[in-house]
Image: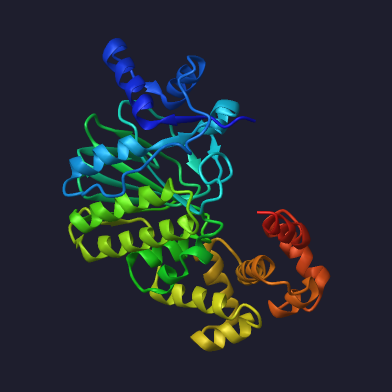
Amino acid sequence: MNDIYMSYTEIQKYLNTTFSTHHQKASLFDAIYSLYKSGDYERSISSKKINKNVVIKTKYDLFEFLKNITVLDVTSIIHKPKQLYQNVTEDYFMFYKRDARILLQFQNERTYMHYHNYFEINFVLQGDMILNLKNEKHKLTAGGFVIISPNTLHQINISENSIVVCITIKKSTFDDVFFNLLKDDNLLSQFFNYNLYSSNQNSLMLYTKIDRPILTTISDIFIETYSTAPQANQICCNYISILFSYILRNLIQTDDLKNNTSNITSKLVSIINFIKENSEDITLSILSQKFNYNPDYLGKLIKKNTGRSFNYLRNYYRIQKSCNLLKYTTTSIDEISLTVGYNSPNHFERCFQQFEKVGPRKYRKSYSQR
């Protein structure tokens, strides 16, 4: 399958022209497929040069910089168009060799209700954005920041001349890449901790002041998203963590602050983190003693608030730890199974297959070939 790349500018031009000419919006696929049929695309982005010395002082500076460097890999969209409007998964087109990406939302685009299995974050820098979420419409203006949890049905419409950046983060690697964020005790860490396990549809909406450090950090995230230099993925994720910190620092406490996960408590976050840190030998009995709960009640409390059982969470963290050992060490499979808490290598391999959809040996081999 040949790679197909298209610039943000060309796609946006098509959407704007269609809207002004026919007085109706075209879908993202309409724009991409039309450009593809006309041959207006690239097979490589390696030649694209990014001027990293651009000084970002205003939102306009940022927008001009971003729209000129933003390029989409649309290969999967061309070959599997239906998935764009159904259950969009991490492996569809967004995350090739990346744990997070950032892009500009398109104006004048015909959108649809959809959901996906990764986190989506939208930040309104200028103008406004309409978010249709669980049959409720929310209008976010400049400074509006919304996190949409995996499997949450939603639709986004961007007004003309509005600037909205979208950050997408893998759920499957969130623990590993953003572990420092999860250890904090703040609004964002509570949201992410809860929604890594919950099967509920959730979102977090807040407002923050937009200043120069935020604009500069967003441009840094874009630069690393399109960089092919070593450690670009990790640097990109680090900049996203810095952006979260700036947003929390500038947080505006108003009536616009909406958190649809009101059943999150600091204690529950502490319980989940304790399971994570002690997954090798933790039991429900030990956990209940630590937090002064009846074991049966605690098991039901975890299930009710996360949608997952205690055993599921314990296995989840054991497998996450084993993934790192498989990727970065030469420790044998049998020894890894014991290290992460399994008495039987066969049990470990069954659980690994269940979570990763591949056996530990194939998993290790796939990383050794990268």
Which residue is found at the position 26% from the left and 45% from the top?
A: 124
Q: Is residue 154 left or right of residue 293?
A: left
Indicate whether 175 appears above or below 295. above
Closest to the observer, 292 or 17 = 17
User: What is the tally of numbered marks visible in this picture?
Assistant: 0
Closest to the observer, 210 or 7 = 7
Residue 164 appears in the rendering: yes
Indicate whether 13 appears above or below 332. above
Q: Is residue 113 left or right of residue 309?
A: left
Please provide percent x and percent y for residue 271.
Answer: 50, 77
Occupied quadrant, residue 131:
top left
Q: Is residue 211 left or right of residue 351?
A: left
Which residue is found at the position 56% from the left and 70% from the top?
A: 300
Please provide percent x and percent y for residue 152.
Answer: 46, 46
Which residue is found at the position 65% from the left and 54% from the top?
A: 370
Please provide percent x and percent y for residue 259.
Answer: 32, 57
